Image (tube, rainbow, N blue to C red):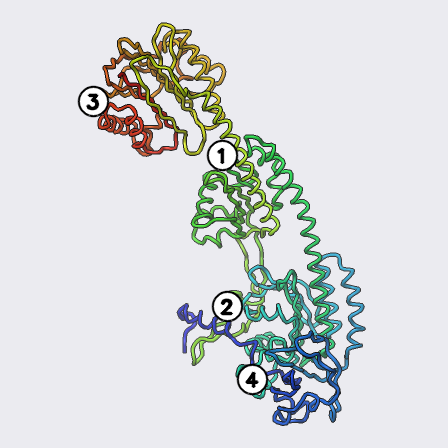
Amino acid sequence: MTDVSSAPADAIDRALLDCADEPIRVPGSVQPHGVLLAADPATGRVVVASRSVGAHLGRTPDEVLGRTLTEVLGEGLPDLPPGDEPLDPQPVDVTVAGRAVPFEALVHRSDGLLVVELEPRGEVGGEAALRRVRPALRALQRAGTPDQVVRLLVQEVRRVTGFDRVMVYRFDERWNGEVVAEDAHERLEPFLGLHYPASDIPAQARALYTTQWLRSIPDATYTPSPLVPPLVPATGAPLDLSGSALRSVSPVHLEYLANMGVRASMSVSIIVHGRLWGLVACHHYAGPHFPSPSQRAAAEFLGRTGSLLLQGKADEARYVDSMALAATSAELARALSASGRDPLAALTRDDVLLDLVEGSTGCAVRVNGQLRLLGDTPSASDVDALVDLLWQGRTGTLVTSSLVADHPGSALADRLVPVASGVLGVRPTAASPRDVLLWFRPEVLKEVHWAGDPGSTGIVPTAGGLRLTPRASFAAWVEEVRGTSETWDPAQVHAVEALARDVDEALVRQRSEDERVAATLQRVVLAHTPVLPDGYALARHYQPSGTDVLGGDWYDVVPLPDGRTVLVVGDVAGHGISVAAITAQVRHALRAFLVDEGTAQGAFARLNQVLADLVPGELATVVAVELEPSSGRARVTRAGHVPPLLVAADGARYVLGATGAALGVADRDGRGFRTADVDLASGDCLLLYTDGLVEERGSHLAATLERMRGDAERLGRDREGLAAGLVAAAVDGGDDVTALVLQRL
C-alpha cells in the first residue's frame, strides 16, 4: 500500500490528471429514473437506447432499437423540426400507449442524432410549475442589490422545487466557492459563509456548468443504466451526453454527496457576462427527491433570470464606478495637457491619483527620473527594489493582490506586507526606463471558514496506485489569511493603463518642445563660426548626454579689443532645458565681462558674483585661454575645471598651475584664480574639454586623465583626428561631452 505522505509529486499529479481526464461528457450510461432514446433524424429510427426502457416502457433495448420513435412512443411525441432548426427546450407531456404513467419529454441534438429523454411526470406538471414561477419573478424583480437577488433566488427555487436546502455558491477568482445565500429546513445546520476549495468542482465539471445550465441527481445511490449499444453505430464513439438531463454523473461526485449525507441534489448555473459566476446548489437529505422536468425548467428559468439581474446590477455598479473613474481620468488628462514642462507636478497635485484608484492607500510616481510618494507607501529605496522585483523579465501592467504569494521567499515582499500587500503598476513607454506609476494597498486580515481542510488533496492509496477521492470530512476549518489585500477592479486597471498612455502623450509633447527649444538654445549657446586669428585653426566637438537634447556644456571664442583672443569651455551642473537656459546667460555674461575686464581672472570674479546673486545654488566650471596670436603664448585660467592638455612634438602633457574653485563657491574678488602660461609652437595642439570626456564610473579621475593623455600622445598633432579620436575612446558616463582643439599652424 502506498504511503500518500511520501508519494512522489509526479504520482499525485498523475492522479489529479486522471480526474481531470475523467470522461464525464461520455459516461456511457444514464440515471435510471428515466429513459434515453437516440434516433437518426432522417429516418426517425432509434439507434441507441438506455437499458431503463424495460422499467419504464416495458420493452427490452432490442425491442426498441431499429424502430421509429412513433412506433416506440406512439403519437404522443410532437412533430420535431427537420435539419438543424432549434428545438424547444421546454418539457412536453407525452402519453405512451399501454403505459398508465404519463411522461414529460425533453429533446435535444447530439452527435447528429435526436435525443429524447422521458421521465415520469410528477405531481407538479407544467401549469403548476408555471404558477409557482410567477410570484417568484415578481419577488426577484423587486430586488435592489445583488445580495437581495441571491437571497430571494434561494427562497424561490426552494419553494418551486421542494429541496431541504438551497444555496447560492459563488466562485472567486481562483474557483474556490463561498455560500453567499441559503434557505434551508430549520433542522439543518447552516452552511452560510462556508468556503469550499476549487478541487471540489473540477475544471471539466465547471466547463459543463457553463454550457448546461441544470444538472439533477434525484437519487445519489442510483445504479447507472447503460446505453445499448455503448457506441453509436454510425461513428463508433460513445454518445456525447453533455446536454442530457439524465446523464450519469461521476462516481467521485456521488461519493462526495454521500460523504456530505446528501441523498438528492440539483444545481442551476449562474452565468454573468459569459463566465460561471456561481451555482444555485440544492440538497435533499431524507431520501430521493424527484422534481419533475417542469419544476426543473422553472428552477432553471429562475437561475437564468437571477443571472440577468446580477449582470444588470454589476453593469449598473460598473457604470457608476466608470463615471467616477472617467471624471478623475479627465481631470488628470487636462492637468497633463496643461502641465507644460512638469507632468510630475500635474500628476501629484491634490492626491488625484489616489482618487483614481479607490481603495488604494498610497501611490508612487516616477516621471523623467523624479520620484514622488503620496499617502502610505514604501520608502524610495524600497520602491526602486520593488520595480526591479515586479518587472524582472516581464513587461506590461502589473496587478497583484498578494505580493508575498506571487514572490515567495522575497524578503522585500515580506517586509512590505503592512503597506503594499497589493500592488497595481504601469510603466509609461515614452518615459525613462525606470519611470513607473504604482498604487499600493495594505494587507486585510481575514478569517475564512472552510467546510473541511482546504489543503487536503483527496489522494488515497489503493492497490492500483494513488486515486483521487472526494473529501470525507466537512468539519469547520478556520484559516487566517494574511498578506493579501483587497482585489483590484478591472475598471481601475483599465483606468491606470489609460493614464499611462496620457503620460506618454504628455512626454512626447514635452520631448518635441524640448527639441524645438534645444535647437534654438544650441544656436545661442554654441559658436557656430568662431573667428580665429591668422595662423590658427580650431577643431570642435559637442555632444549632449543621451537622456537630454541639450545640457550645461558650452564653448566660445571671444576676440578682445587689444588683438588677443580668448577660448572658453564651460559646464553648468545639470541637464535639460532649464540648465541650458542658465548656460546661455552665463556664456553671454562671461563674453561681456571678458571684453570689459580684459582678463579671465577679472571676468571670472564678476561672473562668480552674478551667479551668487542671481542664481544662488547653481555651479559652473570654466577654463579660459587668453591667446596672444603673434607669440603663441597662452594664459590659462581655471575655475574648478579640468586642466587643458598640450599635445606638442615631444609628447602630451597637462597644463598645470592654473587653479581656482568653481564659480558659485569662489571668493568674490578673484584672488582665488591663479593662472599658468604655455607657449604654442608651430603644429602644437591645445585641448580644452569638459569632464564628460574623462568621467568613468568606478574609475579615479587621475587614472582616466592619464589614459586620455596617452591616447592623445598616440593620436598626435592632427587637430581633427585628435578631437574625434579622444571622443571615440571616451567611456559614455551619461554626461555632455565638449572638446575644442586649438592648433597653431
Q: Amino acid at mark 4?
A: Ala
Q: Secondary structure at mark 2?
A: loop
Considering only order in the chain, which callout, 1 or 2, is on the residue closer to the N terminus?
1
Q: Which residue is mark 3?
A: 651
- 2 vs 3, front mark: 3
Q: Which residue is mark 1?
A: 370
Nearest to the observer: residue 124 or residue 127: 127
- 4 vs 3, front mark: 4
Q: Amino acid at mark 1?
A: Gln
Q: Which residue is mark 2?
A: 456
Measure the alpha-carbon separation of dots 2 and 1. Answer: 49 Å
Considering only order in the chain, which callout, 1 or 4, is on the residue closer to the N terminus?
4
Work out whether 311 lies above or below 226: above
- 2 vs 4, front mark: 4
Nearest to the observer: residue 133 or residue 546: 546
Nearest to the observer: residue 407 or residue 519: 519
Measure the alpha-carbon separation of dots 2 and 4. Answer: 44 Å
- 4 vs 1, front mark: 4
Q: Secondary structure at mark 1?
A: strand
Q: Which residue is mark 4?
A: 234
Q: Is residue 117 left or right of residue 387?
A: right
